[in-house]
Amino acid sequence: TQGDAGSVEGGHVDLAALEGVRAPSMTRTVTNLEGLGLVRRESDPADARVVLVEATQAGHDAVMRIRQARRAQKAPEGP
């Protein structure tokens, strides 16, 4: 489910469905984000077949920076 700062909690399949991509594509994306320190993976304690993906603090910070930059681009210019 989507949370604060654009975070999404769930497994690769959930994230793939949310983003409209296939699971293998999401797996590659998560692997890349994990390599950058933006997300971490953990086993789901309720289902060992599921791997949960969670944004790290660096990931949350990156989302906030991107949102601020987008808002700044959309802000109307003064007189």
Image: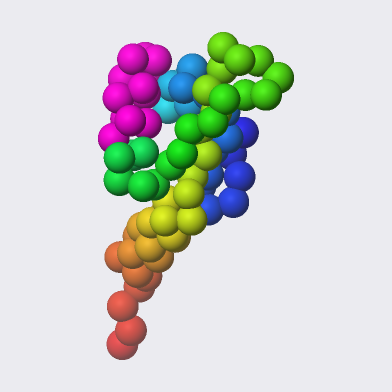
**Residue 7 image position (x, y, % from top left):** 53, 44
Q: Is residue 21 above or below residue 75?
A: above
| Residue lying at the far right of the rendered structure | 46
25 within the magenta span: yes
Estimate the x, y position of residue 62 in percent, counting from the top left. 38, 56
For the image, the number of numbered tags is 0
Specify the farthest residue to the bottom: 79
Tell me the quadrant of the picture where the N terminus can be found.
top right
Residue 10: x %, y % from top left: 57, 28
- Asked if residue 54 is positioned above or below residue 59 in the image, the reply reads above
Instruction: Tell me the quarter of the image containing the C terminus.
Output: bottom left
Please tell me which residue lies in front, 73 or 11: 11
* 38 horizontally vs 51: left or right: left
Magenta-drawn stretch contains 62? no
- In the picture, measured across the screen, residue 32 lies left or right of residue 1, that is left
Relative to the observer, which residue lies in front, 71 or 27? 27
Q: In the image, what residue occupies the spot 35% across and 69% down?
A: 72
Residue 18 makes an appearance in the image: no
User: Which stretch is magenta?
Assistant: 20-32
Residue at the spot 31% in from the left edge and 78% down from the top edge: 77
User: Vertically, is 56 above or below 24?
Assistant: below
Left or right of 17? Residue 29 is left
Residue at 36% over, 47% down = 37
Q: Is residue 38 rendered to the left or right of residue 11?
A: left
Q: Position of residue 29 (x, y in %)?
A: 32, 30
- The residue shown at (48%, 26%) is 15
What is the chief secondary structure element of the magenta stretch?
helix
Say if residue 30 shows up in the picture. Answer: yes
**Image quarter of residue 2:** top right
75 or 16, nearer to the observer: 16
Residue 28 falls in image quadrant: top left
